[in-house]
Amino acid sequence: MKHLTTAEIEKELNEVLESPTDDGVLNLIVRRPKENEREVLETGELDIEKGLVGDDWLTRDGNFDTQLTIMNSRIAALLAQDESRRELAGDQLFIDLNLTDENLPHGTRLAIGSAIIEITKQPHNGCKKFVERFGLDAMKFVNSPIGKQFHLRGIYARVIQSGAIRQGDTVKKI
């Protein structure tokens, strides 16, 4: 798979930045049972103590401020270039929603299905694996000033209320 150049990413950026500010959509749920393994789920269970049930977050990290990783589904689709590659980003929830600090400041709560999550202040950055999967230009772009402004690499959240989630669920600010 050819990786996109910075110019190619910039050309499509307006579509990404048009994500809704309210009433987003959960487009993809990905569980990571072990390092470098991904399971795309139609439905999932978010748990206050375990995060996404069946995900290895608790054994790998255990920091409640990084319990859930969220990426804008539009930028994930752009960088992946193929629907089957989106989960390689390493995030658990892919949401069509504006992830900026202005729209989702730290502490903002989101209702997804019967669960409630809260945005944390922990920064989420591209890494070596992101470069391998999507290219150096993609990693530099998501970590650039504009990438950080729009949280193109994503954001972290923690579970406030356990509950079931499903692809296609509305994501509402509360």
Image (tube, rainbow, N blue to C red):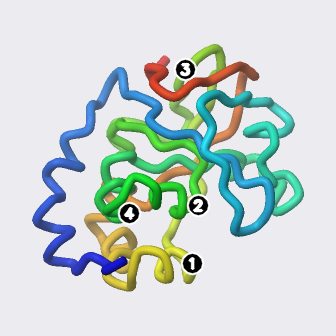
> In the rendered structure, are the residues bearing label 3 and label 2 in contact, judged by CB atoms less than 8 Å apart?
no
Q: Amino acid at mark 1?
A: Lys
Say few, some or many: other residues with alpha carbon within 10 Å of mark 4 (under 14 / 14 to 19 / 20 or more).
Answer: many
Q: Which residue is mark 1?
A: 129
Q: Which residue is mark 4?
A: 80
Say few, some or many: other residues with alpha carbon within 10 Å of mark 1 (under 14 / 14 to 19 / 20 or more).
Answer: some
Q: Which residue is mark 3?
A: 111
CA–CA distance in space, label 1 to label 3? 30 Å
Secondary structure type for disc 3: strand
Q: Which residue is mark 2?
A: 90
Q: Which is nearer the N-term, disc 2 or disc 4?
A: 4
Q: Could you tell me which residue is drawn at 79 percent across and 54 percent down?
A: 33
Q: Amino acid at mark 3?
A: Ala
Q: Could you tell me which residue is drawn at 45 percent across and 24 percent down?
A: 168
Residue 162: percent from left, percent from top: 75, 22
Say few, some or many: other residues with alpha carbon within 10 Å of mark 3 (under 14 / 14 to 19 / 20 or more).
Answer: many
Based on the displayed image, in which of its 4 quarters is residue 22 positioned?
top left
CA–CA distance in space, label 2 to label 4? 12 Å
Secondary structure type for disc 4: helix
Label 2 or label 4, whichever lies nearer to me, is 4
